[in-house]
């Protein structure tokens, strides 16, 4: 029979949600006792904290923390009583990795996919043009999909949530208007679109014509990225990922959207990119 | 945790015992979040980390003691306010609690 660690490791490798629960405060006889909990229609829990009532309450709470993607220490009585502090349990949630869907198979896409992988994203590259959307061009992506953006989002959109990101890099109204309107129907936490200030204004008009209201437009970070003077695809990828982090954490960082003037400036004295 | 799985597998396949050290609590400013994981083989090989580099040496010592002793898990606390702050403290002024145990489960 596989041990707890093997079950945990297998779930982590398969990128399936799992939680490791361990007694980190309390009586010596249960200190270090563990549960490995996997969610699902019929959640599975292996191991024990030494008391069936405590197990039951902790498993219930763990499923809640795991759904929220939170790792916390919670306290209980010896049999799982609330408002007692006899036993401290560290619940470590391993939620599925956040997802990034990138529309447009361009050079910026490869750089963005690479940086997103460093940050732990499951990355999908989607483009309707089979010549460009190939595995060979995007070996770093987890998935390369040849499809129209709106069609792909009809499929995966319902599973996107606040931890996920959609980046529209096509700069072609034929693709980016349907991609953005479809992305706006999801609960995705970050939605950005690449393009010059002029492209952005023209796209806003087209989005309005397609029925997107002010609230919808306000969800779109465009031009995509932080205003850090990025020039190369790699620097631009960093500026996009930094903006995603700032949006998630609610920090004020200078988004290109909230600035004006040229996106690219070459004042004398700015060193060239590496 | 995921980043240390390959090392754990390799050490175990070589027949080495392994200790697991995990950050299970933090107070104040701390470099890594709860869940940060380091593993130590009985040969003293290390993968992963639990801080910005300031307490790793002390955690290796604890891990090797756990492997050579009675195998009971132990909770180690590192922080600026400790007496040993200057020996193994966190330079950032916070406190971390690290659970060190044999990976025999």
Image: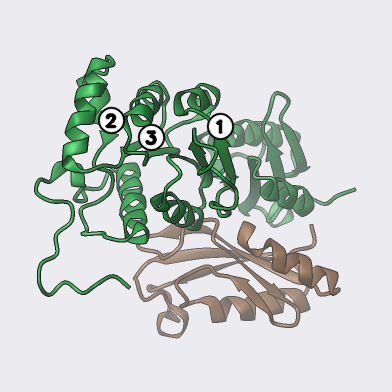
Q: Which mark is residue A189?
A: 3
**SS at circle 3:** loop
Residue at the spot x=17%, y=41% of the render?
A197
Q: Which mark is residue A137?
A: none
Which quarter of the rendering shows the C terminus of chain A? bottom left
Direction front: furthest residue: A131
| Nearest to the observer: residue A140 or residue A60 | A140
Q: Tell me if A266 is positioned left or right of A56 in this view.
A: left
Residue A47: quarter of image: top right
> Dot 1, crowdedness within 10 Å: few (<14), some or many (≥20)?
some
Looking at the image, residue B72 lies above or below residue A260: below
Name above or below for residue A226 compared with residue A78. below
Name the spot of residue A265 as percent of width and height, x first: 14, 59
Chain letter, brown in picture: B
Give the residue at x 21% y 35%: A200
Q: Chain of mark 1?
A: A
Which label sits on residue A64?
1
Residue highlighted by disc 2? A219
In percent of width and height, residue B8 lies at 73, 66
Q: Earlier in the sequence, mark 2 or mark 1?
A: 1
In this view, the mark in front (2 or 1): 2
In this orientation, which residue lies closer to the viewer: A256 or A243?
A256
Q: Chain of mark 2?
A: A
Question: Residue under mark 3: which chain is it in?
Answer: A
């Amino acid at each position: 029979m596989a041990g707890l660690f093997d079950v945990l490791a297998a779930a982590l490798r398969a990128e399936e949600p799992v939680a490791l629960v361990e007694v980190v405060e309390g009586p010596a006889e249960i200190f270090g006792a563990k549960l490995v909990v996997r969610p699902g229609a019929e959640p599975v829990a292996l191991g024990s904290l030494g008391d069936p009532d405590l197990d039951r309450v902790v498993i219930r709470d763990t499923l809640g923390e795991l759904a929220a993607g939170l790792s916390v220490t919670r306290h209980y009585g010896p049999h799982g009583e609330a408002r007692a502090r006899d036993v401290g349990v560290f619940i470590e949630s391993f939620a599925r990795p956040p997802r990034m869907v990138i529309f447009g198979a361009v050079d910026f896409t490869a750089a963005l996919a690479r940086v997103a992988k460093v940050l732990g994203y499951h990355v999908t590259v989607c483009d309707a043009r089979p010549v460009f959307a190939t595995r060979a061009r995007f070996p770093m992506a987890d998935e390369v999909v040849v499809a129209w953006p709106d069609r792909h989002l009809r499929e995966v959109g319902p599973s996107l949530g606040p931890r996920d990101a959609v980046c529209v890099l096509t700069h072609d109204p034929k693709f980016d208007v349907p991609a953005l309107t479809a992305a706006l129907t999801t609960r995705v936490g970050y939605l950005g679109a690449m393009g010059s200030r002029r492209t952005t204004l023209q796209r806003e008009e087209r989005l309005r014509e397609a029925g997107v209201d002010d609230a919808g437009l306000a969800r779109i970070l465009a031009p995509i990225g932080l205003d850090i003077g990025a020039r190369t695809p790699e620097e631009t990828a960093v500026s996009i990922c930094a903006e995603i982090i700032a949006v998630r954490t609610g920090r004020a960082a200078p988004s290109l959207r909230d600035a004006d003037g040229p996106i690219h400036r070459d004042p004398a004295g700015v060193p060239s990119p590496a | 945790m995921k980043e240390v799985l390959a090392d754990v597998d390799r050490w175990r396949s070589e027949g080495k015992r392994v200790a697991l050290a995990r950050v299970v609590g933090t107070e104040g400013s701390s470099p890594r979040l709860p869940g940060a994981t380091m593993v130590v083989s009985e040969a003293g090989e290390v993968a992963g980390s639990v801080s910005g580099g300031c307490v790793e040496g002390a955690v290796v010592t604890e891990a090797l003691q756990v492997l050579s002793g009675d195998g009971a898990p132990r909770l180690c606390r590192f922080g600026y306010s400790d007496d040993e702050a200057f020996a193994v403290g966190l330079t950032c002024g916070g406190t971390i609690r690290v659970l060190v145990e044999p990976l025999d489960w």
